[in-house]
Image (cartoon, helix red, strand yellow):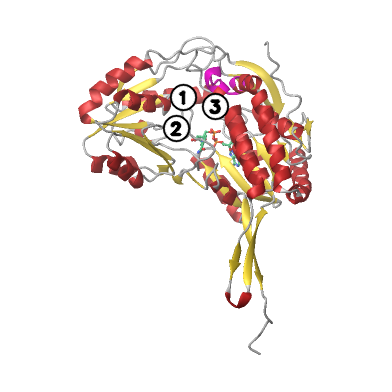
């Protein structure tokens, strides 16, 4: 192994690495080879206690710093992340199996964007002045919530750690972050860098573990807010646990998003949208447009051209820059995807291309293209979280809108058309939090990101995230004598 993937220790608490081998061991597996590349240990209850206590201790002083001071630390961390982008990208690739051609542009860079954006915003977070009658007035104070817990999925471990940490810290909160047990390495680097940039001890902590550790974090009375990126079933559990103590929540959950392609669309552009919306990160993206509705007149041309372009995918060693499709993140996820492909075939969908496991080491599967998919099929209803694109045929706008929205999910949705009036009408009709016109799957930090319906509550990124990491205190100021009825 030319790169040292074993972290200094499993956890990062109170400004330093902490080890406790009494916890359950978690072997970190490189998805491209199936080899164990590191071992960490799940947090014991004592470790979780240390992390929450450290975050609680650090919070008041952190919130008492000026926004300019906090922001400077976040922006310095962004600079360090950019300087180390290559090494951080290699680590992200070891953690997830995503190809270096992606990780060098979409992970530490996206994390750095969040740190820079919220770092810049920290000094601008103020309340407002509200004049009332008789000279009275109200002012509001925008205050931190306290200790925030972040829980991440395994597809974007660096990005998720930053998307949650940056707005939380900008607002004066401290954080305890638990990565997915599948990808425990990257968040530790985020913690290291934040502290190197000047974050005081306890401001950003990382503990490893499975669901049980997450559950202990979520139910702790000292925790004011929980932000989860994960599946809908986990989201329901975490939301319910947080609700018992009236904690704030942000839920970034799964989806089964529609991508509608009208016959007037630029065909190659629409196909690029479908490729980006189904095969990026080997299909392991929550906002993927996995139900690709193609208007009848262009369906065969669409399938033919898409199949040709899929031939250009380079499946292989994710450390080679030319590779565009890496392995699945885990053997378990590979098995789930294979199961869905088998179900698609069994239920009568036409497998146009791909879908076969690639023999040899690593968790590789060919991207799959299904045609003749109908709304009732399992592959059109359930989130697969893998490189499986389903083409569904439609005739009219009215029909496709009803079908696009006939899902319990509502994370994202997209439309390709040359008709601008139709484009805006269609997105207005989508029951989804994040919509695209003539593109797909971009998530710049400036734009709110999040879901409707079962896909979640709250928004990450943008100014909207501030509302989810702070609360407003109202202060009524009387300029007059206080009177009472008796
Ligand atoms: P899971 O829901 O299985 O897990 C998410 C995180 O929650 C993990 O860290 C997990 O720990 C933890 N967890 C599990 N059970 C509990 C519990 N009871 N209390 C607290 N924490 C718990 O999701 P995956 O990791 O499998 O990720 C894939 C899912 O994430 C997909 O459904 C995808 O759509 C969604 N996702 C959503 C995104 C969005 O922004 N909307 C972005 C990326 C992914 P562990 O796994 O270690 O046991």
Mark 1 or mark 3, which has the lower sequence index?
3
In this image, 299 relative to 252: left or right? left
Which residue is denoted by mark 2 in the rendering? 441
In this image, 252 relative to 206: left or right? left
Which residue is denoted by mark 3 in the rendering? 106
Ligand 1 location (quadrant): top right
Q: Depth check: 378 or 86 in front?
A: 86
* SS label for mark 3: helix
Which residue is denoted by mark 1 in the rendering? 280
Mark 1 or mark 2, which has the lower sequence index?
1
Please determine whether, in this image, residue 442 is positioned above or below residue 268. below
Badge 3, how many Cα within 10 Å: few under 14, some, many 20+? some
- List x then y, in percent, for residue 344: 34, 26
Whether residue 241 is visible here, answered yes or no, is no
Q: Read off the magenta span.
A: 93-104
Badge 1, how many Cα within 10 Å: few under 14, some, many 20+? many
């Amino acid at each position: 192994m030319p790169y040292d993937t074993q972290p200094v220790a499993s956890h990062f608490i109170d400004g330093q690495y902490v080890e406790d081998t009494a916890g359950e061991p978690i072997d970190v597996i490189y998805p491209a080879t199936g080899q164990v590349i590191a071992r960490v240990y799940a947090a014991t209850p004592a470790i979780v206690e240390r992390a929450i206590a450290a975050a609680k201790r650090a919070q008041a002083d952190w919130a008492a710093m000026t926004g300019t001071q906090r922001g400077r630390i976040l922006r310095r961390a962004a600079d360090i992340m950019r300087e180390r982008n290559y090494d951080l990208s290699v680590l992200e690739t070891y953690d997830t199996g995503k190809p270096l051609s992606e990780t060098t542009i979409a992970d530490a860079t996206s994390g750095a964007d969040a740190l820079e954006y919220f770092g810049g915003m920290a000094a601008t977070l103020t309340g407002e002045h509200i004049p009332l009658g008789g000279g009275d007035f109200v002012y509001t104070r925008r205050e931190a919530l306290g200790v925030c817990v972040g829980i991440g999925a395994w597809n974007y471990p660096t990005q998720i750690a930053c998307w949650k940490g940056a707005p939380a810290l900008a607002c004066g909160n401290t954080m305890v972050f638990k990565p997915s047990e599948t990808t425990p390495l990257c968040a530790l680097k985020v913690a290291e860098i934040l502290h190197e940039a000047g974050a005081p001890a306890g401001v950003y902590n990382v503990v490893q573990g499975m669901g049980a550790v997450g559950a202990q974090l979520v139910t702790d009375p000292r925790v004011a807010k929980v932000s989860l990126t994960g599946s809908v079933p986990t989201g329901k559990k975490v939301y319910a646990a947080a609700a018992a103590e009236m904690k704030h929540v942000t839920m970034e959950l799964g989806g089964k998003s529609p991508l509608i392609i009208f016959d007037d669309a630029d065909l190659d552009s629409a196909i690029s949208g479908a490729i980006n919306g189904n095969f990026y990160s080997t299909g392991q993206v929550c906002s993927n447009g996995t139900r690709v509705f193609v208007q009848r007149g262009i369906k065969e041309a669409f399938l033919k051209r898409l199949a040709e372009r899929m031939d250009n995918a380079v499946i292989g060693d994710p450390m080679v820059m030319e590779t565009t499709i890496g392995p699945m993140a885990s053997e378990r996820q590979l098995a789930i995807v294979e199961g869905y492909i088998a179900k698609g075939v069994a239920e009568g969908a036409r497998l146009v291309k791909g879908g076969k496991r690639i023999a040899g080491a690593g968790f590789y599967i060919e991207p799959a293209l299904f045609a003749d998919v109908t709304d009732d099929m399992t592959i059109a209803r359930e989130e697969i979280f893998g490189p499986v694109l389903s083409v569904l045929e439609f005739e009219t706008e009215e029909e496709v809108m009803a079908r696009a929205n006939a899902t319990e999910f509502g994370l994202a949705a997209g439309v390709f058309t040359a008709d601008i009036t139709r484009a805006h009408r269609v997105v207005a009709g989508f029951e989804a939090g994040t919509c695209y016109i003539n593109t797909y799957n971009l998530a710049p930090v400036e734009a709110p990101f999040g879901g409707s319906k079962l896909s979640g509550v709250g928004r990450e990124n943008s100014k909207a995230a501030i509302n989810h990491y702070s609360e407003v205190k109202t202060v009524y100021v009387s300029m007059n004598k206080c009177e009472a009825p008796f």
